[in-house]
Amino acid sequence: MNNLRSYDRTASRGTYTASTAETEAQKEFITKVFGWMTAALVITGVVARGVFTSEALQQFVFGTPFVFFALIIGQLGLVVYLSAAINRMSAATATWTFLGYSAINGLTLSVLFFAFTNESIASTFIITAATFGVMAAWGYFTKKDLTGLGSLAFMGLIGILIASLVNLFLRSEGLYWIVSYIGVLVFTGLTAYDTQAIKNMYAYGGAGSEQNQKVAVLGALRLYLDFINLFIMMLRIMGRRR
């Protein structure tokens, strides 16, 4: 961080290398990214569970189709806004926008509690977390360039989006399962690729603590989306419906 360069400096207490300090700063940056991602997941889970247990919130979210679809459009708008305008925001605005998005996402994802049993949601979350953790660790520690994997996963993501839109009209059970299984592969691949990309994004956070915070929030958003989508795809496969 702060454009540190590798050099050796001998002092009375030993030898210090700036490259070591930079590595530690990079680890601190990654820790911040995963910290914000975890905070967003907690908010989403608490809000989603809150809707499931509150008749007032259920009436607000599902009382009229307009509100539910407005929430979906609103959360998509927040993602686009945060990604496109983050350089013009303050770090505090970027952080609160991200956390606000995670809360709105919790409102819409509450439908999962009505569709699947609590036990299957809990077990699928644990499996998702373990899978996500393994792929994120691989993306962080591997020396292999994962750009090719990222490109392949992104093409798979486009295919999933198109197939999902088509299946809204076809309502094909076979296509539903194909999308679900491919989705698991796509989002596990994206988890590894995004982790490596975020690790490399650290260099752009060296302008100061303000910029570093905004880059960390943007990275947390990417990993948050990977986790949520991986969880949904796994739940579609392993979840037990009510």
Image (tube, rainbow, N blue to C red):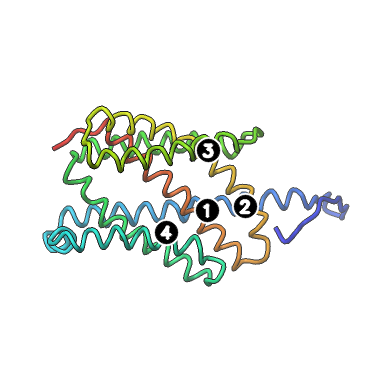
Mark 1 or 4, closer to the camera: 4
Q: Is residue 228 above or below residue 3?
A: above
The image position of residue 28, as x and y in percent, is: 60, 53
Q: Earlier in the sequence, mark 1 or mark 3?
A: 3
Q: Quadrant of residue 166?
A: top left
Q: Is residue 138 left or right of residue 17?
A: left
Identity, as a three-letter code, of the amino acid under mark 1: Gly
Q: Which residue is denoted by mark 4 in the rendering?
A: 79
What whole-number distance in Å separates the C-alpha atoms at marks 1 and 3?
13 Å
Q: Secondary structure at mark 1?
A: helix
Q: Which mark is residue 168?
A: none
Q: Is residue 162 left or right of residue 47?
A: right
Who's the residue at 37% across and 64% down the image? 100
Marks 1 and 4 close (CB-CB < 8 Å): no
Q: Secondary structure at mark 2?
A: helix
Identity, as a three-letter code, of the amino acid under mark 4: Val
Q: Which residue is denoted by mark 1 in the rendering?
A: 219
Identity, as a three-letter code, of the amino acid under mark 3: Ala
What whole-number distance in Å separates the C-alpha atoms at marks 2 and 4?
19 Å
Which quarter shows the N terminus? bottom right
Marks 3 and 4 close (CB-CB < 8 Å): no
Q: Earlier in the sequence, mark 2 or mark 4?
A: 4
Q: Which residue is denoted by mark 2 in the rendering?
A: 201
Q: Which residue is denoted by mark 3 in the rendering?
A: 192
Q: Earlier in the sequence, mark 1 or mark 2?
A: 2
Q: Earlier in the sequence, mark 2 or mark 3?
A: 3
Q: Is residue 48 left or right of residue 40?
A: left
